Image (spheres, grey):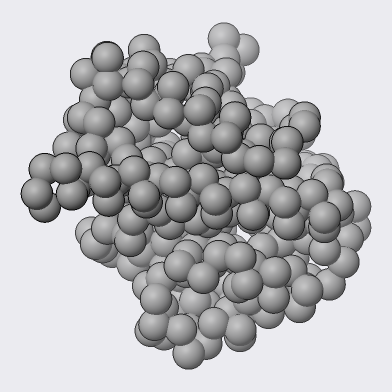
Amino acid sequence: MRDASFPLGVVTSIGSLPHTTSDEAVRFVLRHLPELPAAPSIPAHEPLEGMLAQVGWGVAGVVIADDGTLSVPDPRALDPAAALDDLELSGRPYTTLRAFLRAVATRTEPIKLQLTGPVTLGLALLEAGAPADRAFAVAAAVVAQRAAGLVACAARHAPAAAPVVFLDEPGLVGGLRADVPLSADATIDLVSGVLAAIEPHAVTGIHCCGRADWRVVLQAGPQILSLPVGAGIEPSAAALAAFLERGGTVAWGAVPTEGPLGEQPSRLWRRLSDQWCELVQAGCDPVLLRRQAMITPVCGLALHDEVLAEHAFTLSRRIAERLHDQVTGIRLSVGA
């Protein structure tokens, strides 16, 4: 398992941006996220950089249209034992990723990468007509292969930059679904199997963009949990406390990507502080909550404009600065 410790008050992002060229998106990320730059995608301009298009690319039996949509014309063609095409990530869905890796070729600090998780891909295959057992078996195999290709590509292009790899799992939002034959244990096994394949090569994380069954998510075994402030983590405070005590990090989505942001970070900082206070009352360590924290926008920003994206990143930075100052004050107050 890779070392998952980070400098205090790290800012990173969830991936998609509104820019119209790969180079612009990469420059934007490197300017705003110097400690942990996140490989961007630009799906609003290039639909094949959408999350389902990227993960479904090269899967036998899956067709990716130019608009980024995924279809399965013949579910019998899906085979979990089939090799995945384009493990080199040379196709159109990975244009901005390649530009990012070229830009960080000489970097010696960590970089953040991201790919669609197996639950989300499995649900997409299920909705496209695949039977459940085949959909999730294929999803597990595909994401494990794609993750291996991703970390190998990063190692070729930026060999000294330690990768941090998030599984993006909107399929886990809302908790387990009654219409999907996937139990809690099966869900944990599905996600943890992919994380276990990544762990020898990268720090691992899971991102969920809304309320989820956080006990299930944490039991899958990520080293970083990425969730929005206000996403209902309080009932899982005991599981979160144990996660923090094991050295886990929480990437707090403190800047909304829907609705008004405001000009100043004060309101957003209060929401985050209130969240921490509730978790402390439920048994979490107040110092670990702050010391083992990252700050991010809640989700990707592809559906916004560049001005709003800039403002969201600026607010994230200012919240992180408040976090840094607060934890430094705690250290000084106890003589550290």
At x 44%, y 46%, the residue is 322
In this view, the residue in front, 141 or 9, is: 9
At x 51%, y 34%, the residue is 269
Identify the residue at the far top of this view.
178
Residue 37 horizontal/vertical position (percent): 54, 67
Q: Quadrant of residue 174?
A: top right
Give the side of residue 251 with respect to residue 185, left or right: right
Q: Quadrant of residue 217?
A: top left
At x 63%, y 72%, the residue is 31
Residue 281 horizontal/vertical position (percent): 27, 14
Give the side of residue 252 with respect to residue 56, left or right: left
In this view, the residue in front, 124 or 244, is: 244
Q: Can you see residue 192?
A: no
Give the side of residue 48 with respect to residue 244, left or right: right
Vertical placement of residue 53 versus 252, above or below: below
Identify the residue at the far bottom of this view.
106
Residue 178 horizontal/vertical position (percent): 57, 9
Give the side of residue 266 with respect to residue 262, left or right: left
Residue 150 horizontal/vertical position (percent): 52, 68
Q: Can you see residue 312?
A: yes
Vertical placement of residue 246 versus 200, above or below: above
In this view, the residue in front, 4 or 27, is: 27
